[in-house]
Image (cartoon, rainbow, N blue to C red):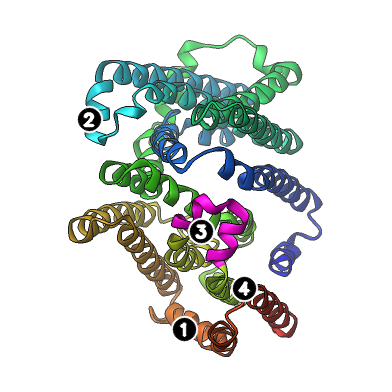
Amino acid sequence: MFKILTNLKSPYAREGPFVANVLTLMTGTTIAQAILIIISPILSRIYVPRDFGIFAIYTAVASVLSVISTGRYEHALMLPEKDMDAIHIATLSFILVFLLSFLTLLIVWIFNHSITEILGKPEISMWLYFIPLMVLLTGIFQTLNYWSNRIKQFKRLATSMVSKSIATALTNLGMGFGGFGVSGLIVGGIIGQGVGAGFLGFSVLRKDKEVKKQLSLKRIKSLFVEYIDYPKKSAVGALLNATSYQAEFIILTMLFNLASVGHFFFVNKIVNIPKLFVSSAIWQVFLGENSRRTKEQILNSLNHYQSTLFKMTTLPFYSSLFVASNLFVIIFGESWREAAVFLYPLIIGAHINLVVASFSLFTILNRPDADMTFNALLAMVKVLAIVLSFLLFKNILYSVVAIATVQFTLFLLLGSWNYKQLGKSSRYFSSMYLKQLLKITPYMAILAAINGFINNFPVLLTSVIALNVFHIKTMEI
């Protein structure tokens, strides 16, 4: 993985600030995510699956609302030449997030009973009132994040992410051990987001003197109109993107009990850990390298780096299928054994998601229309698959299999679409994937034989690790 990142950065070797900034953000993101991952085995023992089920629906709704809370105007902060105009846009973002949060609070207050009836979960009633606060803090954090990015305060950004994770982790642990139940997860997220936003806000007011200048309502209105495409177009795409990943939790909550939803939410979170660490970092640098290149150059870059990522990740993901269930129970506790069965379909879906999402071409090829179409299709097909599987089997396992199948199929098609846009056959990507599966077949056969004849978990786990180490050392990149 580090070889990929090193190769991606090589064109910028003489542009020290670029690489330094990427590394600073990557370091902050990695530490922040690592903190939350490290405490996961503790959280799985002090919170029950039902707590994670309530947290899943709360997080899903808050996440969908948060992406449009500022009208996406914070993305326009990077565009004006004058800092004062950017400050006016930031102020506009703050106004919009306050308005949406207040509107959300009114909706929750007036329609609380109706919402809980639709979801079929009256026990989440009181937690709905926390959603407006989370949306508000997230919108403020996002705006301050982009402002800090504009003025190149990358260390400030990295520190804020780490501070946010530490605050979240301490609250989760403290309230969890104190027996406060799901409130520890929800309040932890709110406190963490508040600490992150507070840190950035304090830094802005203390160091960025321009922020304190007189604001003009007339200029705010003018910039609102000038960048109106952000709420009209970008916000729609962002909403569809968030919905494509969060709708499944909302629909599952309506159809199954909260403990089952909690099982799925937790397993899905763990399975997607590699994507958190790898995908965004690779894509950010891949975007920088290819944003001004010809299609032929983009094709060569995509083919080289994606095939390398395939080689490095296919065996680790697929070989983990032999040990995932037992390892999951050992790490997260016996109470999660029932959830371990979700690992198998989700691991396969997560692998292709990682390999394709790390090299998305929507931005590079300037195809926001295709981005919106893909996310809308992903959301709709997931919902239909969940509902259909429920009607046929009434078992959440089949719904999880349906989700993973949809994810696998659509990301396979997206990978094919990427190459087709660059002049290759639509079968090129699927052929690349099939070749990697064939290459790992001998390794999988060895593990299947060990599993069948010896059937000893320590031996099987050692074999998986040894074969992966051998594969990486003998792999040609």
In the rendered image, which quarter contains the N terminus?
bottom right
**Residue highlighted by disc 2:** 117
**Secondary structure predominantly adopted by residues drawn in magenta:** helix
> Which residue corresponds to the image point at 45% horizontal and 74% vertical from the top-left?
419
Kindly identify which numbered label has been placed on residue 457: 4
Q: Gap in Å between the C-alphas at discs 1 and 4?
A: 29 Å
Q: Secondary structure under badge 1?
A: helix
The boundaries of the magenta stretch are 324-339
Q: Amino acid at mark 4?
A: Phe
Q: Secondary structure under badge 4?
A: helix
Residue 189 falls in image quadrant: top right
Q: Residues within 10 Å of mark 2 (few under 14, many from 20)?
A: few
Asked if the residue under mark 2 is in contact with the one under mark 4, i.e. CB atoms within 8 Å, the reply is: no
Q: Gap in Å between the C-alphas at discs 2 and 1?
A: 46 Å
Q: Gap in Å between the C-alphas at discs 2 and 3?
A: 44 Å
Q: Secondary structure under badge 2?
A: helix
**Above or below, 261 relative to 135:** below
> Which residue corresponds to the image point at 38% horizontal and 21% vertical from the top-left?
126
Q: Earlier in the sequence, mark 1 or mark 4?
A: 1
